[in-house]
Amino acid sequence: MAVGRGVAGGGAIAAVIALAGCGSATTASTTASVSKAVGWGTLRLASGASLPYPLSWRRVGGDKGSASAALFNADGTVRAYLNVTPAIASETLAGWARFRVGHNAEEGDKNVRLLSKQTNVPLDGGRGSCVTDQYTTTRTSYRELACVVAPSGAAMRVVLVAAAQPDVWDTERHVLQFAIDHFTS
């Protein structure tokens, strides 16, 4: 699975996920509600950016400086995945769709297809660009929502990735949506 870079948060992302075929979701009013949610932990970057994840998922390694968690199938494949990563210089809001599709292909993913893209959307008090794409790894396929966000007042852009196997995308969307809605930079 392409361990990626991306970041997002809030109601604008709910619209992006809806466009990605996830349906609509309800957003809790504050990030504080996440800390009170039973069964949720926090993926946190050194910059302070954080993304909730279900404690029933397993934290996994990823890119340097990133934080990731995954839900695994019985066969060991990743069923669903959440990641928050500091962005690198080439991950820009203007070039995000081109970068993300190319990044997945460079990592060895096959049949990479861009399903949708949005640029200059309001995310966690800043601006962001998001793509929904689909690709095949050596073991399975994934659909992902990947966003790069430039939070207001933050020196560092962040990347957020929420992914799942296409056949369970609708089943896992509530978890992916909750995490994205509660991302904080």
Image (cartoon, rainbow, N blue to C red):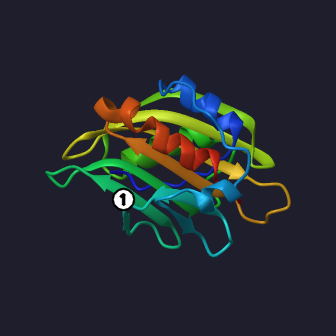
Is any atom of residue 112 visible in this view?
no
Judging depth in this view, the residue of 85 and 108 nearest the camera is 85
> In the rendering, at what x and y percent does residue 13 appear?
64, 37
Residue farthest to the bottom, as pictured? 46
Q: Residue drawn 52% across and 24% down?
A: 23
Q: Residue drawn 40% across and 39% down?
A: 172
Judging depth in this view, the residue of 113 and 166 nearest the camera is 166
> In the rendering, at what x and y percent does residue 176 appear?
49, 43
Q: Is residue 83 left or right of residue 77?
A: right
**Crowd class of label 1 (few under 14; some 14 to 19; many from 20; radius 10 Å):** few
Quadrant for the C terminus in the image: bottom right
> In the rendering, at what x and y percent does residue 90 appear?
62, 55
Q: Amino acid at mark 1?
A: Ser
Q: How many marks?
A: 1
Q: Residue drawn 55% across and 38% down?
A: 98
Tell me the element at label 1.
Answer: loop
Residue under label 1: 56
Q: Quadrant of residue 116?
A: top right
Q: Would you place residue 151 above or below residue 145 in this image?
A: below
Q: Is residue 40 left or right of residue 139?
A: right
> In the rendering, at what x and y percent does residue 65 appear?
53, 73
Q: Residue drawn 61% across and 56% down?
A: 34
Is any atom of residue 58 visible in this view?
yes
Q: Would you place residue 49 above or below residue 178 in this image?
A: below
Judging depth in this view, the residue of 118 and 15 nearest the camera is 15
